[in-house]
Amino acid sequence: MSEVQKARQTMGRFQHGGDTYGMSDVVDFSASLNPLGMPVQVIRALKVAAASFEAYPDPQCRELVAALSDHEQVPAERIVPTAGASDAFARISAALKPDKAMVCSPCYSGYEQALHLLRPRVVHHSLVARENFDLTERVLDYIDPEIDLIVLCSPNNPTGRVISHELLIKVLHEAERCGSRVLVDECFIDFTDSKSCTSLLEDFPNLVIVKALTKSHAMAGFRLGYCLSADPALVSELRVSGAPWAVSSPAQVAGVAALSVSGYLELTREYVAKERQRLEEGLSECGMSVVPSHANFILFQSPVPLYDEMLARGYVIRRCENFRGLDDSWFRIAVRTTVQNKGFLAALEDVMAKQG
């Protein structure tokens, strides 16, 4: 394989959803954002603060860190704001410099992308389709002293499955015994009824958590995430591992405003649960093999090619063949508004009727 072919293969492996630029008159089901949209309080706050954007951002994100500390009930000194979750993963990779890392398959390709420049050895723990791609206690047998970093995602992307709190504690204990760090990506946890693992930070300094407001508050354009760790040395490294002023002033203003909105996440969870059920039932009725999700997106396997047919009807879905362990029969869709979800299912019914 030539270097050009290798580069193209790598680029394809790291492609994500949400790239609808250049398309017209489409509904984007490929990016999993809050279907309620950005809170109006965020838009108002940005308008008020716009005149201040000519100055450099606060490099320490003081007001944002205070708001995050209150929101997460975590001391401010354990929080590192980042330019989205992707920046967080890159900082963690740069700070830890692992020689060997373990990721699950299928999972978000951004982890490997962040590790890519360091060229560590990456091992894959395969999740099983017949088990709904759940992480099981089998993972404990794969943790050994050679592994510097274990990467987990809860709920996992693209499967939407949450890791049980009890299993996560077992993983952390085993990792601690082996001298391994554990990264838990919780970017979609706010869409579920499951509790965050932030309560485990105190007992496990080997744990680092990544979260983001981009999904939960429909602010993907701002690139706003954060790391949480109880290890002061790691926190210091994370702060200097990214570019200066990485979190822009508009992102900081948006984050503070978003976190001040009372009841938004509670309403989100209620809405997403109802619409997710609608989509899962509709997908099953259309002959799809559905992985029951806890999140605001759904992974399913189709008996027929779908992407081009749905695109022709105005719906962009996430092709999943570049997720390790999946092929081109797998797709992921976001949970969107009631009207959009009904329209999607009607289009899917039309596709399947013409296939039959």
Image (cartoon, grey):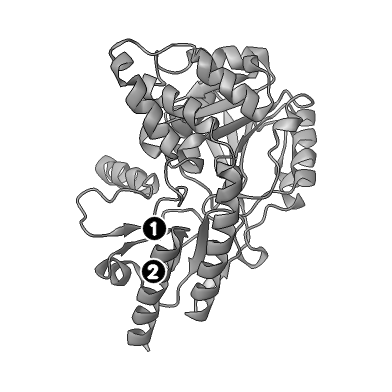
**Pointer 2 residue:** 344
Q: Is residue 89 above or below residue 311?
A: above
- The spot of residue 228 in percent (x, y) is 62, 25
Label 2, secondary structure: give it: helix
Report whether residue 231 is seen: yes
Nearest the viewer among 84 and 121 is 84
Q: Position of residue 2 (x, y in %)?
A: 27, 44
Residue pictured at 42% horizontal, 21% vertical: 247
The answer to whether marks 1 and 2 mark residues whose Cβ atoms lie closer than 8 Å is yes
- Residue 159 can be seen in this image: no
Judge from the rendering whether residue 36 lies leftward or rightward of residue 192; answer left or right. Answer: left
Q: Position of residue 202 (x, y in %)?
A: 76, 24
Q: Callout 2: 10 Å neighbours few (<14), some, many (20+)?
A: many
Q: In the drawing, what numbered circle is on residue 29?
A: 1
Q: CA distance from mark 1 to mark 2?
A: 9 Å
Q: In this view of the protein, which residue sits in the foreground, 166 or 320?
A: 166
Residue at point 38%, 82% (across, down): 352
Which structural element holds mark 1?
A: loop
Residue type, mark 2 in image: Phe
- Left or right of 85: which side holds 305? left
* Amino acid identity at mark 1: Phe
